[in-house]
Image: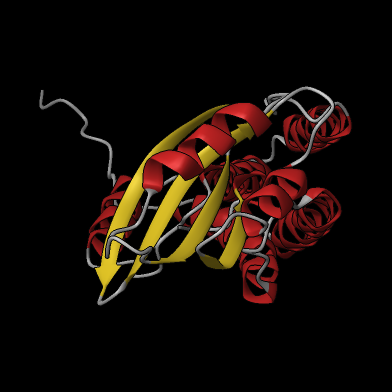
Amino acid sequence: MQPVIPDIGIATMIEPLFALIALGGSFVLSLFVALVYKWTHRGLSYSQSFQFSLVLLGMLGSVVMMVASGSLLRAIGILGAFSLIRFRTAIKDPKDMAYILLVLTIGLAMGAQMYSVAIMTALFVSLVILVLTWFNFGMTSKHESIIRLMCKSGKGGSVNASAYEVVLSKVSDSYRLLSAHAHGERMELTYGVRPKRGSTSLMILEAMQKEDGVEDAELFDAKHQVEF
């Protein structure tokens, strides 16, 4: 008597009502997560296309789970198809990657008919995001700013950088030289500074502008994720 080998290529039929619930539910929950992303986004890297992608990825995740359910061959085929896809868009903010994983998890749960898990995940994780954003979680009280100085040479033909550093030591809590570039008779000095308690980066900028030899001063605030 030969053993019965199950046919791994036979897939269970997907009922239209089940597919409609999975797609509709993943759309609503992914749209909710996208709105939470919009409400809590900080910085300069906001993208409308990323909002669209969050909604679409959640729905596609449910479709992938429905297609792969009940058929091992389909699941292997989906893995092979995904191996051919190359995502060229770089994700600069790790938090954006967490949002992508969140909507995919919701979509997969809806596709697997785990509706309560999908709803609880969307609501609970979104609540955690809102609370962490409200308390400004992870932000230090003193953040570093970037100050760029364009200085001209003095009587001796050189830039007296030590004099500028003396001023920085007085008006800032700490400083460090990031780069120095010579442009003929001028030199560009870039410092990373931390303001003292009760002071601001603008006060440091104003103090440096008053120094002899400083032709131009520019401030970049690292708190708002400006790339240097």
Residue 103 relative to residue 31: left or right: left
Res 49 → quadrant: bottom right
Residue 191 relative to residue 23: left or right: left
Q: Is residue 73 above or below residue 175?
A: below
In percent of width and height, residue 78 lies at 33, 58
Res 172 → quadrant: top right
In percent of width and height, residue 216 lies at 56, 70
Q: In this view, does 129 lie above or below 155?
A: above
In percent of width and height, residue 218 lies at 59, 63
Please identify the quadrant where the C terminus is shown.
Answer: bottom left
Q: Which residue is drawn at 80% across and 33% down?
A: 199
Please identify the quadrant where the N terminus is shown.
Answer: top left
Q: In this view, does 52 lie above or below 167?
A: below
Colouring mode (rainbow / by chain / secondary structure / one colour): secondary structure
Given the current orientation, which residue lies at the most extreme front position?
155
Q: Is residue 143 visible?
A: no
Q: Can residue 174 be seen in this view?
A: yes
* Relative depth, front residue between 129 and 157: 157
Q: Which residue is drawn at 55% across and 44% down?
A: 101
Residue 143 relative to residue 26: left or right: left
Given the current orientation, which residue lies at the most extreme left position?
1
Q: Residue at x 60, y 56 (%)?
A: 220
* Relative depth, front residue between 50 and 61: 50
Res 144 → quadrant: top right
* Relative depth, front residue between 13 and 116: 116
Q: Which residue is drawn at 50% across and 58% down?
A: 148
Residue 122 relative to residue 101: left or right: right
In percent of width and height, residue 205 lies at 67, 52
Q: Is residue 32 above or below residue 5?
A: below
The number of numbered badges drawn on the structure is: 0
